[in-house]
Amino acid sequence: MEFTFLGTSAGTPTKSRNVTGLALSHGGPKHWYLIDCGEGTQHQLLRTHHSVMQLQAIFITHIHGDHTFGLPGLLTSASMLGRTAPLYLVAPRPVKTFIEAAIGNSDSSLSFELRFVDSEAENFYWEDDSLSVTAVPLSHRVSCRAFVFTEKNLERQLVRDRLEADGIEAGPAWGRLQQGDDVVLQDGRLARCDDYTRIARKPRKVIVAGDNDQPDLLLAACTGVQVVIHEATYTQEVSDRVGPWPQHSSAAQVARFAEAAGVPNLVLTHFSSRYQFNPDAYPHIGEIESEAKGIYRGNLYLARDFARYTLGKDLIFNATEHL
């Protein structure tokens, strides 16, 4: 499972950071998903190995422009490039209205079916062959969600001792059992997959949150999670000065939540454009890092545009590359 950050700035872009976008790969080298699509996301994608032709689904946390203004351009570009495969758009209802208005009023059209899925629906659930996805309502100025991605179809290992003890010889039946199928043997017996195989590892589970000033809303969803990606727009001092209206989290708030929830890996993103990575700049992004590290004792990461992370089958999370 691989993550590539396409934008890490809140509200407005900076010279070095675009607004929010995240590519999640799983299920094959070209099988990927997009979470949020701020203005300029399709330009950011040109610097990665991701293609809109292999995009499986787009998940939008909320309607705000720094999370959605890149959608019309990305969708129409996919159409101009010749995409014909249907594409899922999992989003709040206002996003559907926004896309229909943008395409309908710009003499544009799509060459593929855009399948809208309402993320605000009661008991929302989405899945494909690789992942299952649920949503957690958050606290923001508009309806906003966190998406919980859980790996499906984990590989099975044969229980060879049991197969041999029951006289099931190596052959095609073993392969079908390992693929998850029940098998009728030549002697008429039914060999059940669950009796002769086991899943030897835990599923990978990741939470990608939208804007949110109450991180504790995610506590229940954190059972079994290995990575949480959450906004940390300000330090607490700046957050107190700005006031409650923006409804964003400080680094301290997110760190307290992650520490209490026992989250092993925390990635902070969506930093106010006031914060810079330039070592001579003020305020420096290091202030957010220092504040979080003073509270959270797990593995902490501050996302940067084009930073790539992997979550292996061994559940080890690593930074792999920064373009």
Image: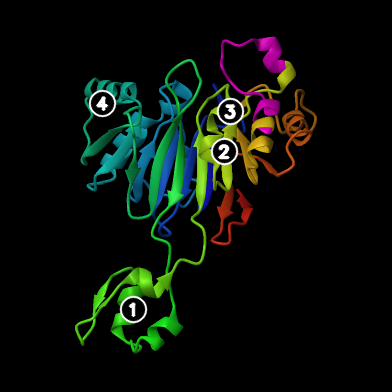
Instruction: Pick whichever of labels 3 and 2 is earlier in the sequence.
Output: 3
Q: Do the residues labelled 3 and 1 touch (CB within 8 Å)?
A: no
Image quarter of residue 165: bottom left
Which residue in the protein does label 1 denote? Answer: 175
Who's the residue at 51% across and 58% down the image?
202
Give, as a single range, the part of the protein colored magenta: 238-255
In the rendered image, residue 224, in percent from the top left (x then y), is placed at 54, 48
Q: Are marks 3 and 4 in contact (CB under 8 Å)?
A: no
Alpha carbon separation for disc pair 3 and 4: 35 Å
- Secondary element at tag 4: helix
Q: Do the residues labelled 2 and 4 touch (CB within 8 Å)?
A: no
- In this view, the mark in front (2 or 1): 1
Residue 88 or 47: which is nearer the viewer? 88
Instruction: Examine the structure image and report whether residue 250 is included in the region drawn in magenta.
Output: yes
Alpha carbon separation for disc pair 2 and 1: 38 Å
- Secondary element at tag 1: helix
- In this view, the mark in front (1 or 4): 1
